[in-house]
Amino acid sequence: IARQHKIIRTIAAHFRGLDGGAENGFRGYFLTFMIAYLRDFGMKFHFIAESFETSVPWGNVLMLCEGVKRRVRSACKESGVQAEPFVSCRVTQTYDTGACVYFYFGFSWKGLKDPVSVFTHVESSAREEILALGGSLSHHHGVGKHRQQWLQAQISDPGVAMLSGVKKAVDPRNVFGSGNLVGDGSGIPAHH
């Protein structure tokens, strides 16, 4: 473990990172568990928020963090969000080759005609920036219906065909995770 800590500190120092200590990790995980409750509470006060994650090589971490925060702010502004949005990020898992970066963002939707469309636009803009800066489609939250629109570009037509083939082989009745990676979820038997 001491060797791993030394490696992590060396990598972090090279990319202007800090060792925040174990306590900050515990606080971060507490925030991760609380975010859904805070999100629901905030909606009552015209504040919409969410978290998302990616993985990225070490050489792109800082550029990705700065770029995604900039993109969230600009997408909010172009969508008519009046107040400055909240946007932050943190590295949650580290590996020899890169890191998992969590982003948290939110904005006041007061006065917006269609806050859900604005939210979708802002989050999609952030995901496009992540992909443009070398981040992955997802680290551990998965792809699902929410990020399916970017899957083909990330894994190619043969990759999508492979996933479709596996899905058909192990779930021919399309019961599990219908439409989460491939397809649109149609064809689920009526008795399910």
Image (cartoon, rainbow, N blue to C red):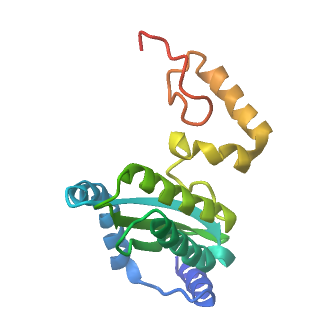
Q: Position of residue 185 (x, y in %)?
A: 53, 26
Q: Nearer the viewer, residue 78 or 64?
A: 78
Q: Could one spot residue 95 in this view of the protein?
A: no
Vertical order, 37 against 89 (above or below)? above
| Residue lying farthest to the top in this orientation | 191
Q: Which of the 4 quarters of the picture holds residue 135?
A: bottom right
Residue 9's x, y, as percent? 55, 86
- The mark total stands at 0
Q: Quadrant of residue 32?
A: bottom left
Q: Is residue 50 above or below residue 152?
A: below
Residue at image x 68%, y 29%?
A: 164
Q: Considering only vertical position in the picture, is 173 above or below 67? A: above
Q: x, y percentage for residue 137? A: 61, 54
Residue in the picture at 50% in, 21% down: 175
- Side (left or right) of 152 relative to 39: right
Tell me if I can see residue 96 in this picture.
yes
Q: Quadrant of the C terminus?
A: top left
Q: Nearer the viewer, residue 24 or 1?
A: 24
Q: Residue at x 34, y 58 (%)?
A: 112
The residue depicted at 59 percent of the width and 36 percent of the height is 181
Q: Position of residue 8 (x, y in %)?
A: 57, 80
- In-front residue for pair 91/112: 112
Q: Is residue 86 above or below residue 124?
A: below
Among the 4 quarters of the image, the one containing residue 3: bottom right
Please indicate whether residue 175 sits to the left or right of residue 84 in the image: right
